[in-house]
Amino acid sequence: MKADPIGVATGSYYLDGDHACAEGAIAGGCRFLAGYPITPSTEVAERMAERFPKVGGVFIQMEDELASMAAVSGAVWAGAKSMTVTSGPGFSLMMENLGLAAMMEVPCVVVNVQRGGPSTGLPTLTGQADMMQARWGSHGDYEIIALSPNSPQECFDLTVKAFNLSEEWRVPVLFMMDECVGHMTEKVVIPNADKIDVTPRKFYKGKKEDYRPFKFNGADSVAPLVKAGDGYFIHITGLTHDERGYPVINAEAQEKNVTHLVNKILKNEEKIRIIEENQVEGADVVVVSYGISSRVAMKAVESAREKGLKVGTIRLVTVWPFPESRIRELAKSVKAFVVPEINLGQIVLEVERCANGEAKTILVPHAGGWVHDPIDILNAIEESIK
Amino acid sequence: MKADPIGVATGSYYLDGDHACAEGAIAGGCRFLAGYPITPSTEVAERMAERFPKVGGVFIQMEDELASMAAVSGAVWAGAKSMTVTSGPGFSLMMENLGLAAMMEVPCVVVNVQRGGPSTGLPTLTGQADMMQARWGSHGDYEIIALSPNSPQECFDLTVKAFNLSEEWRVPVLFMMDECVGHMTEKVVIPNADKIDVTPRKFYKGKKEDYRPFKFNGADSVAPLVKAGDGYFIHITGLTHDERGYPVINAEAQEKNVTHLVNKILKNEEKIRIIEENQVEGADVVVVSYGISSRVAMKAVESAREKGLKVGTIRLVTVWPFPESRIRELAKSVKAFVVPEINLGQIVLEVERCANGEAKTILVPHAGGWVHDPIDILNAIEESIK
Amino acid sequence: MDIKFSGFGGQGIIKSGTLIGKAASLFDDKFATLTQSFGPEARGGACSAQLVIDEEPILYPYIVRPEILVSMSQEAYEKFLDDLAPNGTLLTDTDLVKPHKIRKDVTMHSIPSTRIAEEMGNRIFANVVMVGFFTAITKIVNSEAMKKALPGSVPERFIDINIEAFDKGFQYGAETLEKN
Amino acid sequence: MDIKFSGFGGQGIIKSGTLIGKAASLFDDKFATLTQSFGPEARGGACSAQLVIDEEPILYPYIVRPEILVSMSQEAYEKFLDDLAPNGTLLTDTDLVKPHKIRKDVTMHSIPSTRIAEEMGNRIFANVVMVGFFTAITKIVNSEAMKKALPGSVPERFIDINIEAFDKGFQYGAETLEKN
Amino acid sequence: MSYWRVPLDIQNVKIPKGDIHIITERCKGCNFCVEYCPRDVLEMSTDFNRKGYHYPQVLKQGACVNCNLCEMICPEFSIYCLEGEEKPPEPDQVLRKGENHES
Amino acid sequence: MSYWRVPLDIQNVKIPKGDIHIITERCKGCNFCVEYCPRDVLEMSTDFNRKGYHYPQVLKQGACVNCNLCEMICPEFSIYCLEGEEKPPEPDQVLRKGENHES
Amino acid sequence: MSEPTTDYTDTLTIPEPKENLKHPLESYIRSERFPHIWCSSCGIGTIVTAYISGLQKSGLDPEKVAVVSGIGCSGRAAGYLRLDSFHSTHGRALPFATGLALGNPELKVSVISGDGDIAAIGGNHFIHSARRNIDLNIICINNFNYAMTGGQAGPTTPLEANASTTPYGCYEYPFNLPFLAESSGAVYVARWTALHIRRLTNAISEALQKPGFSFIEIISPCPTLYARRNRLGTGLDTMKFYHDSATIQHGADTREVDIEYQKKIIVGKFVDKDKPTFTEARDTFLNKKLGDQYVPYRRPNNGH
Amino acid sequence: MSEPTTDYTDTLTIPEPKENLKHPLESYIRSERFPHIWCSSCGIGTIVTAYISGLQKSGLDPEKVAVVSGIGCSGRAAGYLRLDSFHSTHGRALPFATGLALGNPELKVSVISGDGDIAAIGGNHFIHSARRNIDLNIICINNFNYAMTGGQAGPTTPLEANASTTPYGCYEYPFNLPFLAESSGAVYVARWTALHIRRLTNAISEALQKPGFSFIEIISPCPTLYARRNRLGTGLDTMKFYHDSATIQHGADTREVDIEYQKKIIVGKFVDKDKPTFTEARDTFLNKKLGDQYVPYRRPNNGH
Ligand SMILES: Cc1ncc(C[n+]2csc(CCOP(=O)(O)OP(=O)(O)O)c2C)c(N)n1
Ligand SMILES: Cc1ncc(C[n+]2csc(CCOP(=O)(O)OP(=O)(O)O)c2C)c(N)n1
Ligand code: SF4
Ligand code: SF4
Ligand code: SF4
Ligand code: SF4
Ligand code: SF4
Ligand code: SF4
Ligand SMILES: [Mg+2]
Ligand SMILES: [Mg+2]
């Protein structure tokens, strides 16, 4: 399906990532936003508060992030494409109700514009240290999808994509920006509505009595949705449940329900995967990065190539699910992976695991507040093939 | 130092893990508990509500888990050894203020009696799926210590230990029980107070003007504490700060502050480490497990040994920091690691990473609600050396 | 020895298991691990406790095929009967359990524990009556150890009446065995 | 070209950068990446914006050694002067910045932008005066592109006065260059 | 003690008659219906149902006035009343134990 | 408009005299002190301090009555008043612009 | 472990009910999930009956009514009602319901949950939803404790009452919920007990028809925990206590309706006033400001 | 990247202040952290001055006073006070303070924080701490918006006011905070503005001496965001507005002290009553129940 033109502000703009994300959301069909202000993400909500009344969207500023996340799930069951926006501390507060959204298989988008942490940390400065939290922050087993843009243009494009993925897999999609990208201003081109692909919500069309809000069999099984108020009399719970949505409190039900939540993402990793590879064939070293670090890394890679080194890059646009099979494959041909992150080592753990001892894995950490000096990455590249 | 006899209920009891944990806390010097009820952890708080008035402790039931975790930090700065108790959903709610405790370097204990998740999941049944959340649940980089007991007796012993570690490293210690252990009743022996080692809080003794609440230099640097009300006029913040505790919002300060938080734990992993090894020398397979699974695993290992297989075991009593160097070392001599967990694969990721391709790593998952059938573990052991 | 106690919330099912486990481990030099399983967050629903008693430390805490099944409700009985190990023992409350099918290999003994308790003034003592019955029939724990287990596990003011309930059940059990 | 704008919260520092970046990228066919750095959660404190303008897509977004430094406060000036690249250009507000040390290699130009704005009725226009001055002095973006950048970036009703402020600054810059 | 309101227009109405239905297996023996029936229609059984509870049974056939109180107060959806044939009121059937009190 | 209370015991007191101290580099030019000084002791400078703000300066030397209002209202801890020598009150020094109003 | 044995001698069948009984409210409940979890003589089931009766009485189309619960014994209500029903997280029923109500303005959304869920962990959402006058109908089942987790004290536990976390009696002051609801902005505030079934049914019907934030506190017996721990007898005894101690006082000053341990309980309708709801206020406001530019939210249709 | 150049021709020095000026309240502030972050003509600095003066006036030993803030412009107060001072997380100042107060009963603990921090995200802790009558003194700086994050609307933003998330004006009803505080159980409730410095100082002194939960709402100018967005002028203009529109009404019925957009502001002391604090109630209660067995909490000494 193509985007609804009412939400698409076609044109060229000089926008920061936060504003571009808001435009992407509206273009992607988002019509409900519940949020709570927090630096450096607030601009997303502010723009939507301004734009929504003119495009038929509902904006509500809740009393906190717990409420925001819960309201998003409610609005989705009412039929709206919905999202919330926050940053580290608020993201931490959303964890319980993010788990609820995962358990209820609520398609929605949660934007986290990452800043320096832990705790209040560096509210106005950049970081990428919520990446593991994105996957593991709520209790219990579940899986989400996480995307990481590296420019304002991508904040637009990938927010649309985030909504599409959430509908396709009935899963919360975490849009893991970083302050640098969120507060970076560049040219953003918003195409015509008919150039924007939008995945419509899959609504159930069959007989009312036969409706089942969940489907646990088959790795890519995703049940269609209905809307509260349409006479299906659904019951939806955060308890372990069966396909009718009814609570069943035992190990067998748990096995079916939770394994499904995990498998529908992990087993479809290759379908969900968006990665950008550059000169990895024949490379000695591959730099694995995401978000703003991918641009800084590219600067270092350019220098390395000038020095004659064979360096490839992989940019994780989907950071979760992690492109495990691809890294395993590459590990067989490259000598080393270099992983610059604006944290003290998170995604590098996955790279190292999948490298499986067949290629070295070198972390280039940065505690946050700034991006890497490209020289540090260059040094690591050189180091890695010594 | 030895335990204060007033808190030590010396004797033999038939207790479940939750009650034993409460006794361990009191013996370990805990005198402040802020909590919010949640199955299957509530009994810990209930016992302390009953016992505290007789041993000079303060119990307060807060309005939610966010408040509980925040109150614990407040009470620690007032001078009390403090803890809170919860289970998955509440643990998720504590994440933001757990990050605050990590950032403020608050020695405290957080008990999580794990149940089946995600979301409300299986409130009354067991799980071990909050293990990664224990490490990664709050935003930003930080480290904690996590212990995992496998019997009511250990719930007593290790709770004392948890308090000791928290004081030694000025860090929140997560006591990761599981419902099975929490609701399992066995004989628990509480020794005499003079048989219980208790690490006293390190209080500062120098000149008031010279006091610095933080110390970032040196990998095992832990600054002594003072108490609010003692005239030091301290300032403590969740923002990135310097050694005086004053906010400094830039990348250099971040580097010092956050690297310290991480290194004081990771660089001292071997000092903190508590693991139990059994017949690992010359083993072909080593089963790595923790919590209740370690007992079930042992049952499988006994069968395997009866069949003549060379199987060793490692039980992670400290799950975090992960005993990275030990697993790396073992990977060189064994053929495979088998990792049974009551989750769909968490600690196994660390095992696999550290195995570094030198030994196979096989997960034996269980979605929760029950423990493994020992046969599944046995099968994995046999499989692993085929 | 793997024992399962079953019934519904409010009957003191778990307490029965605790008393026997406590007696075995504190006063009878055995190892005893009790686990409990609530129904859906445990209100009026089904409820059971599982007790493993052994001479050695117990590794696996749960019970899949109990050797002894104590059933205090029809529902529990129907739910768990099939799990009972071959040649197992089944103890029931006469009034609350109407056996709908009888396994040939199983030895079954019944006691009107609820009625006896009601006669004593309150059906909440039914579980202790059953514990007495259990003690007499199974002989797994001696009755002195059992009586030592009561103090600390029931409110002070109810110790005497609990002992009385225990004795009634034990007596009934002894007679039952004699009759067989 | 690496440019740093600096001053304190409330002066419209970031807006200056946005205007120039917008002009360059939307109306002058260049690439322009603006990043901003707040002071401590950004209230009355120091504040700066960094703008990279290039003919090619920009990878590294931050600026370590700006080639042009615009300083609208004493504090900002003192903080950032040392970072200015060798032979860089320094633009300041005459009244707000008293150069405490002068780097030989640096070309400095000043404009009383705040005073000019105050004369126009409100010191909030000082940033646009400075942008005009910047445009004239640096010639990085042409002034037509700059004027196109104003609509959409300032409230409708203030467009005219902003253009006036821009022109005043531009004029002052042109004269400054002539004088040199 | 019953909880029950006297209709203001008592003179004009016919006392309706109700047929009581009891889903015994749902009952959890709370006694609410028995206690609050204004006509003492019900009593508790001595038998247990499969869950182990005593359940209500009709004591006074035909005394039911279809007031639905038992149905409304039952927490288990296990008792309900359907309209039977009507008959004129008998004074003593309306006010028992003298209460028109409503708390 | 000044915000100031007339002491009830005005007849009995001597008007104190105050010495004003201004930490100009702290000032952020809010004008509160100038505006609310009951004695119009202060005015704003035309100069900027290092932060770029105008700051207060003493306009009427000796007129200060050490009421501390400027000190209390200053959000920057940048102005304060210390006691000088006392002198008897002059009526017009106490009530200016006629207000003893307190809002 | 060996296979289950299936060698039976005999099969006695328990007599199944003879008639095919169908409760008149059957179509409103998910009886396939029965028996429900509530204890014998718990008041929650009675309140659910009253909710259904109130709903019937209100004349609302059940297809346009949704129920949200949090977690707790009371919070299980949603799971037994054959309406669009949601069992959210502990304390978050109100924001979940807010999303539902704003996402489908045609719905009337009720929250049925416990005192702990709504007033302890959910207290913030309670006061803010009331402040905003979101079009929600709140049914707060107050059993004076956290029952689901085993009878801990909560913000409604009266002074002196015993609970599992106040083994020596409660020394925290309880909330006066109607007062709190009023001070936060609720337009309809009432209190009844589980015994006042007809009044309660009427109140629910009235509240369902009232636009904006309505709040009904319902005092309900918890024999298993609260009553047992305080030796107050069975659910029936509790009902009898309500009979003796409840006084109807419509329009009572909410400041004066505190509940003390085993003292009188003032019930009635305390507040009933008119105020534009969040949605009404928003629409009026944006219409005024934006005129034709304002595009009100419309729920996506199924093709979208 | 090349090394910074250090080749200078000349060094002009800005004249440093001649006298060695020392503000009389210098010993109460962390002036080494100055300049503080607050904007020119923001009211927060004035309120901090009033807090210090009130503290001095109260006669309390500053060593026995601790201050906790949440996050926000107002929440930075703790960072500039030379007292034991804690800058916790957004909304959690009250529970942090609760831990501090219970952990050291000798302390008087103040919370100084913003309206958003205390009444939006922190609303639940606010009502519960008041309910429990924890011995806390709350200074709530109400600037009608979330200033720190750039001027979003919050639960105190008056109807119609403009904020960054209500670009067409606010259509959510605001809280009446004194009413909410009273209904939750606060024993002392007052409201002043940043202009009422002497009254405010007295109120703070009084509240610091009052055992139990005291609450002072202080209306304060936010020229940079709230005033600018609503074109209300500078901080000074706001102060003038307070002068013209504030009316002192001690003992006013808290139901009647709502604040409408740019309308009159009722200030004064509204509630002042006596009630045992949480700690007092607990000690009395446990003493009564446990007698000699009750071992009251004593803060560990440094040897422990
Ligand atoms: C975040 C979280 N904390 C705690 C719990 C545990 N919990 C479940 S229900 C409940 C209290 C319920 O009390 P109430 O709302 O009064 O309902 P009741 O059971 O009394 O009807 C609690 C604390 C939870 N499920 N989630
Ligand atoms: C969990 C969390 N959510 C959001 C924020 C962002 N935040 C910081 S301060 C603030 C609002 C402050 O408003 P208020 O308390 O009124 O203080 P003010 O700045 O107006 O003085 C917000 C939303 C945060 N730090 N943490
Ligand atoms: S309908 Fe009324 S009269 Fe008939 S049995 Fe029920 S309560 Fe009694
Ligand atoms: S009211 Fe219902 S549950 Fe209670 S006794 Fe009567 S039929 Fe049984
Ligand atoms: S102390 Fe009073 S009179 Fe003196 S300058 Fe300050 S405000 Fe004016
Ligand atoms: S009150 Fe303070 S900050 Fe304001 S002008 Fe006067 S001295 Fe400067
Ligand atoms: S525990 Fe209490 S509230 Fe819960 S179902 Fe039982 S009686 Fe009802
Ligand atoms: S933004 Fe507003 S509240 Fe914050 S410091 Fe500036 S004026 Fe004060
Ligand atoms: Mg309750
Ligand atoms: Mg504010």
Image (cartoon, coloured by chain):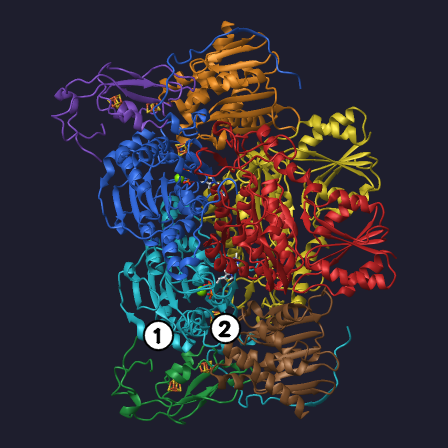
Chain colours: A red, B yellow, C orange, D brown, E purple, F green, G blue, H cyan
Label 1, label 2: how far apart the Cα atoms are? 21 Å
Q: Which x, y percent locates residue G226?
A: 38, 36
Indicate whether A381 appears above or below F22: above
Q: Quadrant of the C terminus of chain B?
A: top right
Q: Which x, y percent locates residue A337?
A: 80, 52
Please report, as a chain letter, where disc 2 is located.
Answer: H
The residue most toward the left is: E11
The front one of C93 and H80 is H80
The front one of C73 and H242 is H242
Q: Amino acid at mark 1?
A: Phe
Instruction: Identify the residue position indicated by label 2 in the image.
Output: H38
Q: Looking at the image, which residue is at 82% across and 36% down? A: B335
Residue B186 can be seen, yes or no: yes
Density class for disc 1 (Cα within 10 Å; few <14, some 14-19, many ≥20) is some
Residue B82 can be seen, yes or no: no
Q: Which x, y percent locates residue H27?
A: 50, 76
Q: Is mark 1 within 8 Å of ligand 8?
A: no
Q: Is mark 2 within 8 Å of ligand 8?
A: yes
Q: Amino acid at mark 2?
A: Trp
Indicate whether G133 appears above or below H64: above
Left or right placement of residue H56 versus residue B102 in this view: left
Q: Looking at the image, which residue is at 74% across and 78% down? A: H4
Q: SS class of the residue under badge 1? A: helix
Density class for disc 2 (Cα within 10 Å; few <14, some 14-19, many ≥20) is many
The front one of B295 and D30 is D30
Instruction: Identify the residue position indicated by label 1 in the image.
Output: H241
Query: Which quadrant of the figure shows ligand 7?
Result: top left
The front one of B151 and C162 is B151
